[in-house]
Image (spheres, rainbow, N blue to C red):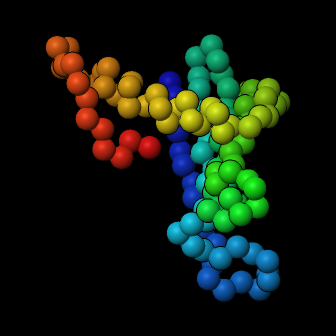
Amino acid sequence: MLSVLQVMIVFPEDSPFPNMPKPTADSRMMAMPAYLGGSFCTASVKWYGSNIANREKGLPRSILMFTLSDADTGAPLAYMSANLLSAYRTGTIPGVGARHLARKDARTIGLLGPG
């Protein structure tokens, strides 16, 4: 069983903290926790930070980190960059959907906004 929840962090328009990010369409932070049961028994969080202004600083627009933990003990099993992992996931989801939802004799696919 795979259980997924996504949480988007929204910053207030006005804050008593002078360096707190302002809410804009080009800047966001999200936490995407998940649990994978069965013989895996792991929990994870993909942390997603994105700001179009990162490019001006020589950074990618999106910076992602992945934490994998033992669901029973909470012990960390992995902490790593998730940029490549996320790119694989984004490209895989439409293919998995097409495999399971398309007619068996289908030869072409059209995708709109998959990721």
Above/below status of 51 relative to 102: below
> Which one is nearer the viewer's eye here, 42 or 80?
80
User: Which quarter of the figure has residue 45?
Assistant: top right
Q: Is residue 106 rendered to the left or right of residue 49?
A: left
Q: Residue at x 79, y 81 (%)?
A: 17
> Which one is nearer the viewer's eye here, 59 or 20?
59
User: Which quarter of the figure has residue 56?
Assistant: bottom right
User: Which quarter of the figure has residue 13?
Assistant: bottom right
Above/below status of 22 relative to 36: below
Residue 9 visible to an observer of this rendering: no
Q: Residue at x 66, y 86 (%)?
A: 14
- The C terminus - image quarter: top left
Where residue 67 sits: x, y (%)? 74, 36
Where residue 85 sits: x, y (%)? 62, 32
Q: Residue at x 53, y 69 (%)?
A: 25
Where residue 4 sits: x, y (%)? 52, 39
Which residue sits furthest right? 75
How many numbered badges does the structure rendering display? 0
Residue 49 visible to an observer of this rendering: yes
Where residue 60 sits: x, y (%)? 68, 51
